[in-house]
Structures are given as C-alpha cells and as structure tokens.
Image (cartoon, coloured by chain):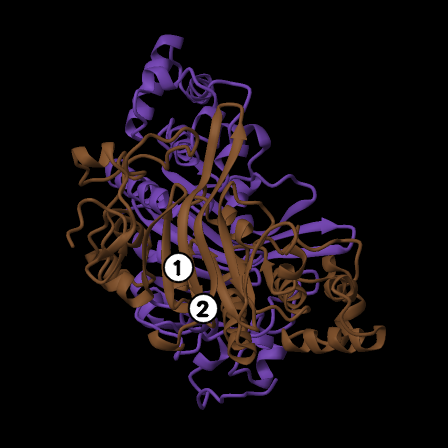
Chain colours: A purple, B brown
C-alpha cells in the first residue's frame, strides 16, 4: 500500500486582533490507500483546522502555516500556489462538510452544480458530464436521479443533501476524502445510512478517508486508525482497537469513561473531566491537558511531553509513559 | 425512584395535540398524546428531529397552547390544576424549562445575576437583599461562583452557560423541569458534567424531569421511563431497561440499532438495521400508522388504521404487528 498523505509537524496559527491563536501546534499523521483515519477531539482542539489546511481552505491571512509539511501524492502542498491548489482540490483531495445546506449553492439546481464540478477537472462534453452526474447520484443512492438533477438544494432533505455533497466530492475520483463531521447535523437513522454509504464507497473506490468527528460511536463503527487531538496537538494515535481497549493518554481514558454505555444505570456516576480546554491564544507551556489531568505532575506544567511508543503504531504524549516514571499519582501536583 | 404503589401523578396529559396552520395545510406537530408524568421521575423523550418532541415540551410548559386536550398539574397541596390562561402564571412558578442552545437562550445584555433574579422578581419572591443571596446560592449550586454574578453571558463557555440556564430555571424553586436537549450543543467531556449536575440536583431538590434528547445512550442512562416519539405520536413507552431489552415497536428497534456504540468489536458484530427513506413531513399526514411508509414489516392494516398505544408484552406500544 502506498501513502496517500503525510502530514509532518504542522503548525497553523491565526493572526487576530487579540494576538496569535495557535490552533494547530505540531500535528503529524499519515494515511494509506483505502484507510479510514478518524480525528477526534472537542470543539476548538484544531481538528477541523488541520483538515482544512490539507486543502488550504483557510483564508490566508488570517491563517498562516507556520511550519511543517503536507505531502499529498508525493508533493508538498504547503508551497503550492493558489493556482496549483485549484487543480489539486477536487481531483486529489476533496471534502464534505458538516452542514450540507450551506455548502450547496441554493440558487442553482444540483445537476448544474455537479456538472460544473466535473467539467472543472475533466474534459467532457456537456452531455457526457450530465451522464456522469447521473451515474454519481446513482452511486450515492439518490432515487430518480434523472428528475432529481433538475431540483434545487432546498427540495432535498438533510440526508439527501449530504448524499449530493458526497457525489460532488467523488466526482473526480479523489484519492483522499476529508469528511468534516459528516453526520453531526443528521438524525441517527439518517446517520446510519450515510455511514453505510461512506463505507461502501471506500470499499468500491479504495479512497482514503479522514473522518473528523467528536462522536466516538461513529469512530468505532468506521475508523481503522484514530488520532486523538487536544489543544492543537495529537495526544494519542493508534488503531481503533488500541484507542478503545488500551487507551494510554489520560485525556483519551477520561473521554472514554465519560460516555454512558447502555448497560450502565444511574448508580454508576459518569466520569466528568473538570474544567475546560485551554485558551490557544496563550497555550500552556507544558502539556495542554495538565490543568484538567487527575495525574498531573510538576513537569507536566513545565515541559511538553515527548511521544512515547506503546505498541506498534500506537503512541501517546504523556509524561506518565516515560520509562522512569514511578506511576500515576492520583491527585497529582496541580 | 418510588415504586409503583406510591407513585404520585404530577402531570397528566390528556389527548393533547398541537397543530400549526401553514400555507400547505395543517402541520400536526403533536398528535393526541396521553401521558402521565410521576413525581420524582425522569421521563426521557426521544425521536428524530421534526418528530414534535420539542413542541410537546413547550406545550407542556405553557409556551404553546394545545390545540386540543388538557394538561392537569397536581400541585403540592394535592389539588389538580388545569393549565389554561388563568392558571398559567402560577403554573410557571412550578414548571420551568432548560433550553438546548445555551448561546441564544441567555440575554446578552443582562448580567448573570439579572438573568437568574428575573424570575424571582416576576413571582415577587423574597426582598432585594435575600434575592441577591439566592443568586449566589444558586450559582454555587450549579458549580459556578459568586464572582460570576456580574459578568455577561458571552464571557462564559458553552458548559458554563448551560449551568447559568439551569440556575435560572431553579431560581423560582420549581418542581417540574423540561430539559429540552440540554446537552446536545456541548462537547462530550462537558456533557457528563451537566448530566451529573442534573442528577445531583434531582436528588437534592426532588425534581421531576422531562428529558428530551436524541442521544439514546444518555437518555437510557438518565431516565426511569422512556417515550419514543415518531411524527407527533408516542409509539412506545416503557421503563428504560425494558425498552432496551424488549424493544417492541419497529421504529424503536431501528432507532436503537442505528446508534453507534463506542466499541469497535461490538460495532463489527452488530447487525445494523438501516431504515430507508427520510422522516415524512408532518403536514397532511396519511391515515394509518405514521411509520407505515418506512416500516420493514408493514401490513395492509397499517395503512388503513392507526394503531393505538396499548399494553402489549409488558409495556405500552402502538403497533399492529406486536401481539398481545
């Protein structure tokens, strides 16, 4: 298998009036063909910014890639010009978003929007592009595509709109699909439909998928590998099984324990993580999670933890995993 | 939770419907609901967006007038009170609501103290000095502190705002609280903080909750009983364990199987039942069972006759297919 994407030590900041917001502070991950990588984390942890930077969708300024490399199909796109990016977007990498209503043009029928996307990257006649659009709508299982392409986005339901978005994203057979919270705005029964569709498309086309979500249930059902982000950093990565059955970072552990399972009743108290995530305008010097961590030590406030290897392809950044650490002390040194 | 014999009815909902006139016809958001809510319990209400669960919650609290039917509230002195224009003011002292969106439900021009105090002023509770003390008490009760009283809503995070919303609802010492998706807008790590807080408050103050949500795992965890709603109708009502272990209605089955479990092995083994189609529009609904169009077991009778909510196999369900 070949690597589709490699992100190395990416730093992204936003220049605001209040100062520099360090949204992504050294993120690395990679992705192989046909693989689903889930990026999980709370709002504001930098997961969407990391993904949007892969397509360079953040307006620059105020956004700024401070350092790092994004290697997509053996090409570093950090240095790519806007013109080059235009041919990359849609063809090599495309994206589906959380809210399918605001991402489709309300003033154009969806067929026209699809044809536009197809003709941007492929030399096809209008007729052929229309046939291709119908084929794509069939692929995402929209009934009666011949009639539906004449309709406008407001005539589609939320789930159907998300299907149109997926069809559009797939129009040029990209190697990488970024799905930014694709099901958050949808109901559970519709979410199940969309997840099944993404799964099917991955098997059919061998597209690699980056799935950004905060729903650990969605992660468990789709992801091969998981990257857990907190305060602009990846704190733990591993296979889905590593993360769910052998979580090693205190944040991952707390996150998993804070979810009620169906066999739990109210005699078991939910574990909650006290406090709130740090302000990335002035990110902490040490570990980002230190102020909320129940096992925090003095060094956690003073120095960033290194990445420690736990197993093959399973790493976590926490001082507790240092080989000389005597073990967690509950209560810790706040 | 009190056992069956000593359960006291707090709210009685009799044939309540809420319809809206729209240009295309009548939107039947809530359709002929019969339900009792018992004192001290948490009743979960689940369903997809547009199924009428929020409208039902708002009707229950008096924000909407029901189109048909009556709501009877049993006050602390044992007298039943019918909710209408005359009783609404005194009812609002007993029943409160926590909204989903902690951003739009707090007035940005008022300080936290003003927001929490407002209800007490309206209901002429306490003098000025005592009210201020109550504000501080309430802030501490919901896990904030005195210093927060003079700040404005925008200075707080989503979780903290939801705490302010809870303090406001508690200020006038209600007995019954409708929680309209109080955690959907919050992050996972903050959700559990709010769930624990709501649970503690219930224990401490003996509150009764109607907990509206679409996250079924959380509803299962927090509720004593759960009602499943589809297109304005309650299709199944059971104790939360019963609903999960012996799911009877095909819609509840699909809904429960659609929820992804945060466990990769269980997910891989799961036989997910995927419903085709979307939730139909509540405008000009066809006769018969509201779920007939998407039901995998649909029979002829389902399209003709609407099933009633009745006792079958130990709990209430509205389905022709389920045998007694």
Residue pictured at 35% horizontal, 35% vertical: B278
Tell me if residue A236 comes above or below residue B69 in the rendering.
Answer: below
Residue A256 point in image, percent of width and height: 40, 69
Tell me the quarter of the image containing the N terminus of chain B.
Answer: bottom left
Residue found 17% across the figure and 36% down from its top: B299
Chain letter belonging to callout 2? A
Which numbered disc, 1 or 2, marks the residue that appears first in the sequence? 1
Per the image, the residue denoted by label 1 is A216
Q: Chain of mark 1?
A: A
**Secondary structure of the residue carrying numbered label 1:** helix
Task: Specify whether A248 is left or right of B205.
Answer: left
Q: Is residue B244 left or right of residue B194?
A: left
**Residue B202 horizontal side relative to residue B281, left or right:** right
- From what the image shows, is residue A113 above or below residue B254? above
* C-beta proximity under 8 Å, tags 1 and 2: yes
- Report if residue B7 is visible in the image: yes
The quarter holding residue A227 reads bottom left
Residue drawn at (31%, 32%) of the image: B287
Say which quarter of the image contains residue A121. Answer: top left
Q: CA distance from mark 1 to mark 2?
A: 9 Å
Residue located beneath label 2 in the image: A255
Looking at this view, is B250 or A38 the one in front? B250
Q: Residue A144: where, in percent of width, then height? A: 30, 20
| Residue A234 at x, y percent in the picture | 49, 62
Which of B209 and B143 lies nearest the eye of the viewer?
B209
Q: Secondary structure at mark 2?
A: helix
Q: Is residue B45 above or below residue B174?
A: above
């Amino acid at each position: 298998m070949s690597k589709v994407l490699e992100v190395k030590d990416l730093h992204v900041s936003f220049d605001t009036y209040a100062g520099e917001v360090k949204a992504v502070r050294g993120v690395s991950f990679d992705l192989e063909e046909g693989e689903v990588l889930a990026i999980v984390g709370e709002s504001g942890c930098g997961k969407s910014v990391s993904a949007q930077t892969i397509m360079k969708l953040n307006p620059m300024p105020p956004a700024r890639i401070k350092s790092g490399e994004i290697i997509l199909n053996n090409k570093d796109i950090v240095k790519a010009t806007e013109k080059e990016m235009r041919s990359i977007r849609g063809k090599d990498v495309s994206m589906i978003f959380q809210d399918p209503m605001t991402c489709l043009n309300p003033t154009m029928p969806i067929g026209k929007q699809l044809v536009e996307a197809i003709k941007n990257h492929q030399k096809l006649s209008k007729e052929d592009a229309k046939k291709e659009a119908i084929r794509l709508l069939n692929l995402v299982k929209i009934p009666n595509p011949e009639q539906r392409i004449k309709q406008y986005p407001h005539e589609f339901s939320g789930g159907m709109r998300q299907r149109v978005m997926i069809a559009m994203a797939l129009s040029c057979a990209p190697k990488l699909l970024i799905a930014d919270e694709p099901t958050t705005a949808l109901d559970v029964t519709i979410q199940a439909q969309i997840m099944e569709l993404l799964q099917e498309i991955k098997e059919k086309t061998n597209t690699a998928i980056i799935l950004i979500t905060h729903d650990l249930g969605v992660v468990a059902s789709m992801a091969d590998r998981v990257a857990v982000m907190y305060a602009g950093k990846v704190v733990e990565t591993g296979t889905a099984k590593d993360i769910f059955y052998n979580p090693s970072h205190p944040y991952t552990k707390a996150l998993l324990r804070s979810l009620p399972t169906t066999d739990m009743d109210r005699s078991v108290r939910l574990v909650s993580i006290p406090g709130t995530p740090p302000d990335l305008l002035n990110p902490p010097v040490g570990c980002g999670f230190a102020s909320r961590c129940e096992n925090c030590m003095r060094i956690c406030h003073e120095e960033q933890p290194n990445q420690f290897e736990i197993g093959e392809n399973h790493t976590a950044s926490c001082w507790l995993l240092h080989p000389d650490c005597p073990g967690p002390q509950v209560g810790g040194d706040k | 939770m009190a056992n069956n014999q000593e359960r006291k009815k707090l709210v009685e909902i009799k044939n309540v419907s809420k319809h809206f006139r729209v240009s295309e016809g009548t939107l039947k958001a809530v359709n002929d609901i019969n339900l009792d809510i018992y004192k001290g319990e948490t009743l979960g209400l689940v369903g997809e967006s547009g199924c009428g669960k929020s409208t039902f919650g708002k009707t229950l609290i008096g924000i909407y007038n029901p189109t048909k039917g009556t709501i009877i509230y049993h006050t602390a002195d044992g007298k039943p009170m019918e909710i209408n224009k005359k009783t609404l003011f005194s009812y609002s002292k007993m029943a409160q609501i926590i909204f989903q969106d902690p951003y739009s439900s707090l007035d940005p021009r008022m300080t936290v103290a003003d927001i929490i105090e407002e209800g007490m002023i309206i209901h002429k509770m306490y003098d000025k000095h005592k009210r201020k003390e109550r504000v501080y008490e309430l802030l501490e009760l919901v896990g904030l502190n005195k210093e927060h009283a003079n700040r404005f809503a925008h200075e707080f995070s989503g979780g903290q705002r939801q705490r302010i919303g809870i303090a406001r609802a508690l200020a006038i010492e209600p007995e019954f609280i409708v929680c309209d998706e109080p955690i959907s807008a919050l992050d996972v790590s903050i959700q559990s903080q709010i769930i624990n807080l709501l649970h503690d408050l219930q224990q401490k103050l003996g509150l009764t909750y109607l907990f509206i949500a679409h996250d079924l795992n959380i509803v299962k965890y927090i509720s004593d009983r759960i009602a499943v709603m589809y297109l304005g109708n309650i299709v199944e009502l059971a104790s939360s364990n019963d609903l999960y272990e012996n799911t009877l209605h095909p819609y509840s089955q699909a809904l429960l199987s659609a929820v992804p479990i945060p466990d990769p092995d269980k997910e891989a083994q799961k036989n997910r039942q995927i419903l085709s189609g979307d939730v139909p529009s509540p405008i000009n609904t066809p006769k018969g069972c509201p779920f007939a169009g998407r039901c995998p077991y649909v029979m002829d009778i389902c399209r003709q006759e609407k099933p009633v909510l009745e006792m079958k196999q130990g709990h209430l369900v509205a389905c022709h297919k389920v045998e007694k």
